[in-house]
Image (tube, rainbow, N blue to C red):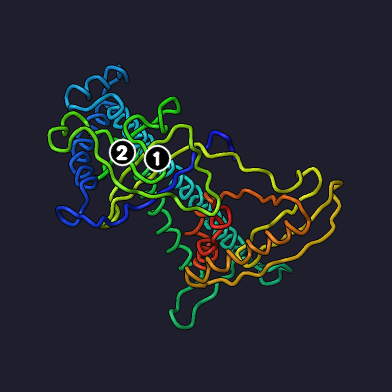
Amino acid sequence: MNKNQALTYCKSFPKSSEPTLFNLTQFEVFLLDYSKIFRQAKIETIQTLQSSDNYNKSNWNTYLQNKYGINKRHAAGVISSAEGALSSALECRTYNIKQLKGKLKSAKDWLRKAKKKLKDAQKFYSKKNWTNRKTGCRFPLCTDLKTHRTNWQRLRFAIHHKTRYIKHLELRIEKLLAAPIHVKVPRNDVLVVGAKCESYGNQNCQWDGNNIKFRVPKCLEDKYGKYVEAYLGDFERNINRLPEDGSKTWHFYRKGFKWVAAVQFTPRKVERVSRHSDYGCIGIDLNPSSVGWSYVDQDGNLKAHGKISLEQGLPKGKAQAQIVKACLELATLADFYTCPIVHEILDFQNKKAEFRERGKKYARILSGWAYSQFLKP
């Protein structure tokens, strides 16, 4: 994994023995009040990022401090959250257009092949001696006994609808390219950016391993004082990669009826527990119905191979349990051969764009394949 890649741990606030209004602690009530100010500042920042060509981050930080009564770090969290939301919206728009263009290309390919199939069939039957030819027609003219419709009629009907579908996709892509970017700004959402040079990795939100202490912005000091504190507890993990030092960015959001604290950080490096891949490795081939594996030595010679069967069409819980079982079997093999596991990286974006033309069975198989579940950390 890239050393600069960040991880995020999430944990909901535990229930307090001394709840306040609406069964919320003082810290959670403060988050409700501050999230309203944070949201208004974020909306204004996004509008400025979209409309202004001479945007200056430092000047805008000062403007937010003066208008909303927050300090520099609070304003930095607003700007970072707004930039991330706008960047995500642009990325989603780009991905959506790319998917639609893939569907358009697939539909046009189908239409071209269908028209050629119909044209070749008409050309075949237009010849006088077609009954004496050694090769038959690749798309024969035959009639369904129930509907009394020929293959050619069904194909012409499909071509007609595919042409309308292509026109609809072209108009949709054209409108998306011209439409402005809309960014959804959620309620009950707060972000506090940290820095590695600050104590506990964050100046305004500090966590000592059990309790979290939040610096109240100036606009709310009269109501809550200078700081608000709450018990959070530790982030229990089998392999905890949260370092004591380093930058820690905190994100507070409300999910259901609970407030959740999410900390983003640069994780500690994972120590190697196996030999390098130059001394041999296990390669896996992920398929919807099985996981094939093969072990090769340092010279690339095949020494062992096998297959782990997977059952399709299972409910979500059983499917996840099946994946866990397969991963444990692979881990046992890696421990036995003392070597790492390597896998292929697949991209199904183009294949998913062909669902409409490939049929329901193909779409069901590919959609039910939990490929991404194998690669989750």
Dot 1: few (<14), some (14–19), or many (≥20) neighbours within 10 Å? few
Please provide percent x and percent y for residue 31. 23, 43
x and y percentages locating residue 170 in the rendered image: 39, 44
Measuring 61% from the left and 67% from the top, which residue is drawn there?
325
Q: Position of residue 86 (x, y in %)?
A: 34, 35
Q: Answer with the quarter of the image where residue 94 lies.
A: top left
In the rendered image, which quarter contains the N terminus?
top right
Residue type indicated by callout 2: Lys
The residue closer to the viewer here, 372 or 267, is: 267
Q: Nearer the viewer, residue 173 or 86?
A: 86
Amino acid on which the number 1 mark rests in the picture: Asp
Compared across the picture, whether 331 is left or right of 187 comes to right
Between residues 339 and 203, which one lies in front from this camera angle?
203
The reply to whether discs 2 and 1 touch (Cβ–Cβ < 8 Å) is yes
- Reading the image, the residue beneath label 2 is 213
Residue 89 location in percent, x, y?
35, 39
Q: Earlier in the sequence, mark 2 or mark 1?
A: 1
The mark tally for this picture is 2
Q: Is residue 131 above or below residue 213?
A: below
Q: CA distance from mark 2 to mark 1?
A: 9 Å
> Circle 1 sits in a helix, a strand or a loop, which is it?
loop
Q: What residue is shown with label 1?
A: 208
Up the image or down, 188 lies above or below 67; here it is below
